[in-house]
Image (tube, rainbow, N blue to C red):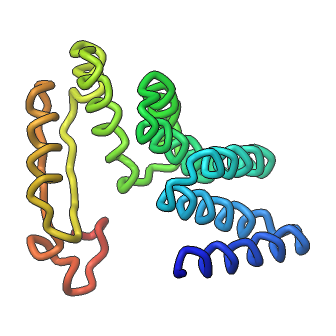
Amino acid sequence: GRFDEATRRLGASLDRARALSDRRREEESLALLAMTSTFRGQFDDALTRYGELEAVARKTRNVQGRMWAKSGRAMVWAKLGRAEESIAAFVDVLPLIEVVNDQSERIIVGLTAALHLALGRREAARDIAERTLAMIVQKNSTRTRFSFDAAIRQLGGASVIATASDMQLGRGETIEDT
């Protein structure tokens, strides 16, 4: 029900964006359609949408759109058990994160390291994880928090994990100001 309605509305948004040549809205609609397909388990459709998103983002030179496409595709490949492709896509995202300087995307570093570790590539994982990973969680999840903390520590890194209640986010302060 709700996914069907969301998909229908996002499809209409995509059509309008294309009719108006509004590339930014086209990219946003493609990203959201791809995520919706991923949530529904429609992985082939998600990969197609992320491919479309990357093509549009390349045309518009939108680094953030390319980052969304590559990280989204990497997540889908990870869900499909295609670890090699997932790692390659995550590694491709790392330089884009530096360009965009979006701190929220740094979680990809941890995911990339965790995938390498799962494949038994301790040195590759360590190379990526040799930094401190800060993880901000909005909903307290013991399993997620402990898993990321353990993975980063196994790789010789350090982690800082905080919830919104640990910081000033609940009082309206931005992540950057916190």
When asked about the image quadrant of residue 94, the answer is: top left
Comparing 107 with 150, the one in front is: 150
Left or right: residue 163 compared with residue 129: left
Residue at the front extreme? Answer: 1
Q: Quadrant of the C terminus?
A: bottom left
Comparing 34 with 21, the one in front is: 34
Q: Name the residue rendered at 67%, 67% in the picture.
A: 29
Q: Is residue 33 visible?
A: yes
In the rendered image, residue 97, in percent from the top left (x then y), is placed at 46, 43
Q: Name the residue rendered at 10%, 27% in the picture.
A: 154
Q: Is residue 28 above or below residue 51?
A: below
Q: Is residue 86 above or below residue 55?
A: above
When asked about the image quadrant of residue 137, the answer is: bottom left
Q: Is residue 63 visible?
A: no
Q: Quadrant of the N terminus?
A: bottom right
Left or right: residue 15 compared with residue 8: right
